[in-house]
């Protein structure tokens, strides 16, 4: 049964096929896998040589080749007899409004819960958390907007409060916002379970007259208006947008790999050169990027350093490899994305939203591994 999604990420490698085996040769040696067990081959390598025999045999076995640039899918090579997955595409297009709405509401609920979880970790004693919690549980049709407004107030205040390194361990218990060194970061509770600007368009700006001064967290929140998300704005906004672009690339990889057409979504409207389904399914994972960005800002408290540098790009592109809990497993975030996408695919084919299970942290914790 063709099921495996094979990721090729060696810096330099050659891919070929012999005797029905997918062969990958690199500096680490040779690896092989029966091509009949492969659903798709995802190539993110910076320099990969692909033998023509692999293209031929992959086509015969119905295997898709997804070729990426900077981790974003650029080319999709499919056999002539499956340039589109007719059954899956028809199932997605023919979803009833009721099923489509149920899938979207599950997505929104997971996103809002994840924002509440992260906000509770960043500002556990902040009074405005209760308002965010009520919004999450309200079930209102516009709760996504309500939760986003409350979350960004808390997130902006938490980043504004970040103390300078010279303050050391001197804060009281209620003020400490100490984060672990970014090289050891994990999401979850010490157990193992990803460009373009974010199309959903929620980007930010942080205004502060004395960047090096620590502002009490409650005062920062009460002040209000210190942080605004928008596509432009520079600084913290640019860091978030780049992180969301990495996430978008990861979701697109998995959608193509399981045969889902990302140009038809369940909520975001289709438009030219857009991928609405990817925008939809990435929503619950946005707090993973927010957490990653917070840790970067923690290590670089001067807003003058909040730019998308080579160092930052290298740092933020590592977040899909962090390990989180999902269902009964501990996986890398990119593995969780694949699991969620596979569940969504099954939910579409069988028209049963229960198979779609967006990710939420099991214990609500965001700690170092």
Image (cartoon, helix red, strand yellow):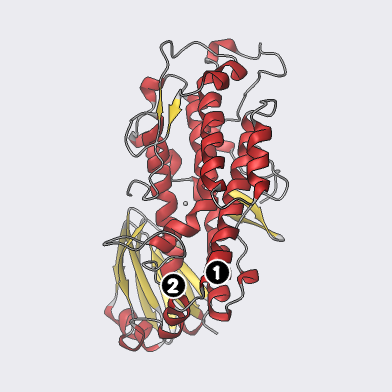
Residue 148 is situated, as x and y percent measured from the top left of the image, at 52, 40
Residue 138 is situated, as x and y percent measured from the top left of the image, at 66, 47
In this image, 327 relative to 61: left or right? right
Where does label 1 land, which residue?
Answer: 344
Q: Which residue occupies 54% across, 61% down?
A: 104
Callouts 2 and 1 close, C-beta under 8 Å: yes
Please state which of residues 79 and 7 is positioned toward the viewer in this rendering: 79
Does the image show residue 3? yes
Q: Residues within 10 Å of mark 2 (few under 14, many from 20)?
A: many
Does the image show residue 193? no
Q: Which residue occupies 55% across, 69% down?
A: 344
Mark toward the start of the polypeptide (2 vs 1): 2
Residue 56 is situated, as x and y percent measured from the top left of the image, at 31, 85
Residue 59 is situated, as x and y percent measured from the top left of the image, at 35, 85
Please state which of residues 31 and 356 is positioned toward the viewer in this rendering: 356
Q: Is residue 62 above or below residue 328?
A: below
In this image, 27 relative to 274: left or right? right
């Amino acid at each position: 049964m063709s099921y495996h999604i094979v990721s090729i990420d060696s810096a330099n490698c050659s891919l070929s096929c012999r005797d029905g085996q997918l062969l990958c040769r690199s500096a680490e040696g040779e690896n092989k896998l029966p091509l009949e067990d492969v659903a798709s081959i995802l190539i993110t390598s910076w320099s990969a040589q692909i033998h023509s025999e692999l293209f031929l045999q992959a086509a015969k076995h119905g295997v898709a080749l997804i070729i990426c640039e900077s981790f974003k899918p650029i080319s999709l090579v499919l056999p002539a007899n499956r340039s589109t997955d007719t059954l899956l595409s028809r199932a997605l297009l023919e979803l009833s409004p009721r099923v489509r709405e149920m899938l979207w509401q599950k997505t929104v609920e997971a996103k809002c819960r994840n924002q509440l979880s992260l906000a509770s970790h960043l500002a556990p004693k902040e009074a405005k958390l209760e308002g965010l919690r009520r919004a999450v549980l309200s079930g209102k049709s516009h709760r996504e907007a309500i939760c986003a407004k409350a979350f960004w107030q808390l997130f902006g205040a938490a980043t504004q409060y970040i103390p300078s390194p010279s303050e050391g361990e001197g804060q009281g218990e209620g003020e400490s916002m100490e984060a672990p060194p970014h090289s050891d970061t994990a999401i979850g509770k010490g157990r193992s379970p990803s460009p373009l600007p974010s199309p959903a368009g929620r980007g930010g700006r942080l205004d502060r007259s004395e960047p090096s001064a620590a502002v009490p967290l409650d005062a920062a929140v009460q002040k209000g208006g210190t942080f605004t998300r928008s596509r432009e704005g520079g600084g913290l906004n640019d860091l978030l947008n780049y992180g969301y672009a990495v996430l978008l690339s990861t979701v697109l990889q998995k959608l193509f790999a399981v045969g889902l057409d990302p140009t038809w979504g369940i909520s975001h409207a289709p438009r030219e050169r857009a991928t609405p389904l990817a925008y939809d399914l990435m929503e619950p994972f946005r707090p993973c990027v927010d957490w990653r960005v917070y840790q970067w800002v923690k290590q670089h408290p001067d807003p003058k350093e909040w730019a998308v540098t080579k160092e930052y790009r290298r740092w933020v592109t590592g977040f899909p490899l962090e390990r989180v809990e999902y269902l009964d497993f501990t996986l890398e975030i990119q593995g969780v994305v694949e699991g969620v996408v596979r569940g969504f695919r099954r939910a579409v084919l069988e028209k049963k939203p229960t198979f779609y299970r967006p990710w939420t942290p099991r214990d609500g914790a965001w700690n170092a591994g």
